[in-house]
Every structure is written in structure tokens, then in C-alpha cells.
Amino acid sequence: MSDHGMPNNTDEAVTTVDSAHGPTDKSILITGGAGFIGSHLAAALADENEVCVLDSASPADRAALPADVEFYHGNVRDRSLLETLLETVDIVYHQAAIVSIEDSLERPIESHETNVAATVSLLDVARKYGTRVVFASSCATYGDPTTLPVDEHEPPTPLSPYAVDKLAADHYVRVYGQQYDFPTVALRYFNVYGAGQRGDYSGVIDAFVERARAGEPLEVHGEGTQTRDFVHISDIVRANLAAGVTPHTGRAYNIGTGTETTILELAQTIRDLVDTDVPIRHTDPRPGDIDRSRAALSNARTLLGYEPQVELQSGLQSMLSGTHAY
């Protein structure tokens, strides 16, 4: 299959993730594990592994986690806590981050300390024990790409402190793995969505859904011709499971669908799924908005065995019904 498309699967494909291709009988730490992506990942790993979560969120947020997942309330910037936890784990899925571009612009030092300095600290501990690190990187590192589909060799042009942070951490993850000879993988997520999405991950999909359900016009910046590669949370989990066992470490992989969707198409699709006739209102273009985005997946397909399973309409139907991937 080329990077231009993906299978048109039924809802059944949305609600199941085959964990047979991921880690088994391992001790696993997920930083930021009470968040949107981390909690889905914990649910997928918990049946076959011993999973613990480190998160600075309220312990009440562990309601999203399986009952047998051990929860540690703490900050990923706490080096002594990382030392204690990493000594006994085989794999770290490093999801903890300040993910809001707006927050990174308002608090760039805090963003750097959480997204970069804490990552370096975690890597420095992991190398002592040979612990595999799978890092949540981002397509934001590319900025406005010069070619499509964008591959992992695209020259980075980050457009925010958050994107600069992710780029720096992405480099650290790969260099640490290569120079200190322990397994590391960076997964460059494109636009993630799915059930349980909240906060800064929600983005345009959540905004459209909320307005459509409230009977309010859907606001599209500019003509709505800008495109994004929307990838369902269950596909993100599949990529993480593969990264937990791949021998092809010390490198970064794009994780998306290889499919472009315009923002106008997205608005029309959500309007249809919510079954409303609210108008679509065009507003001023948003400064700094990138024009087009689509992931090249050749490396992820060839080396990780990753194949996106969830077509956008099926994924949105699952999200609107509140169906979780596990």
C-alpha cells in the first residue's frame, strides 16, 4: 500500500487492538500515563505486562486506568523518583509533556524543563540500566513541510517553543540510544484523536464536535483548504506496541495514516455524523497555521510493521459514541 491511502475499515477495527505484536511479561513504566494517550496505552499493555504509571495529575485521574495498574503521583522532573522507578522496569513509554503550544509560548522555560530537561534526565537514568525508551515525539518538529508526504528526513522548521522542545528531545532520544548503546525509539505523532480525548489534545475535532452538538456554527479558519493527517488513538497504540519490541531502534518514525483531510472536509463530516445542519462559517486565517500535512509511513511500515487500521469516518463515529479502543 502506498502512503496515499489506508483501508476503509468497519467500526470493529476501531474497538480492538491486537496486543500480540507488543511487549509481554515485561515491567513497564508510562510517564504521563493518566493522560489521553498514556491511559489508552496502559489499557493495551496491562493484560500481558506489569504496568505502572507516573503522572502529576490528581490520583483521582487514575479512574481512566485499569485497576491493576500501579499509580505513582509525582513529577517527571523528579530525578530521584525516576531513579527509583527505572531500576526495576524493562521499558519506559515516555508520554509526559506540556503539549500545549499556547502554554509553551506563555511559559517557555517550564516547557523546556518538562519537555527537554526531564527527557534528558530520564534517558540518563535509563542508560544505566539498559532500559528501552519509547518517546512521544511530534510532527510539530517539521513545521510547515516543503514536500508531501513528509518523511523523517524533512528539514525541521519548528514554529513554537513546544516544537523546538520536541525536536531537541527527539534528537536526545536517538543520540543517547546510539552513543550509549541501549534501545530508544522516537514516534512522531501526527494529529491524534479518539475517545477520552481532552485538554490540549482535543484541537479542532473537539471544537467542531462541541459546536455541532450545541447547534452552533462550525468556524473554519480561512478557506479550510489546509490539511492534516488525523490518526486514531488505537493506531497510535499499535505503533507504541511495535516500538516496544522492534530491533530497529535508535531512530524516529512518523506515525499517522498517510491520508490528508482538509479542515473543511472534517467540518462537513462531523456535521453529518452529529446529524445537524448548522452552517460552516469561514473566519480569518490563523497566523502561523501550516498549509498541508501528511505522513510518509515507509519506515514505520517496513521497520516497525506498523499499518494504520482506522479510517477517519469510522474513528470519528467511535469517538462520538464514546467507544474506547480497548
Image (spheres, rainbow, N blue to C red):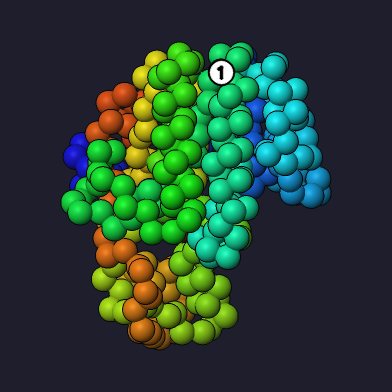
Residue at 50 percent across and 60 percent down: it is 101
Is residue 155 at all visible to an observer of this figure? yes
Q: Nearer the viewer, residue 155 or 232?
A: 155
Q: Which residue is mark 1?
A: 127
**Residue 59: percent from the left, percent from the top?**
81, 45
Q: Amino acid at mark 1?
A: Arg
Residue 98, percent from left and from top: 59, 52
Judge whether 81 appears above or below 77 on screen.
above
Quadrant of residue 84 in the image?
top right
Q: Residue furthest front?
A: 109
- Residue drawn 55% across the image and 53% down it: 99
The residue lying at 65 percent from left, 28 percent from top is 29
How many C-alpha atoms fall within 10 Å of the one at disc 1: few (<14), some, or many (≥20)?
many
Q: Is residue 236 visible to the viewer in this orientation of the structure? A: no
Which residue is at a point 36% across and 69% down the rendered structure image?
288
Instruction: Please provide percent x and percent y for residue 236.
Output: 46, 40
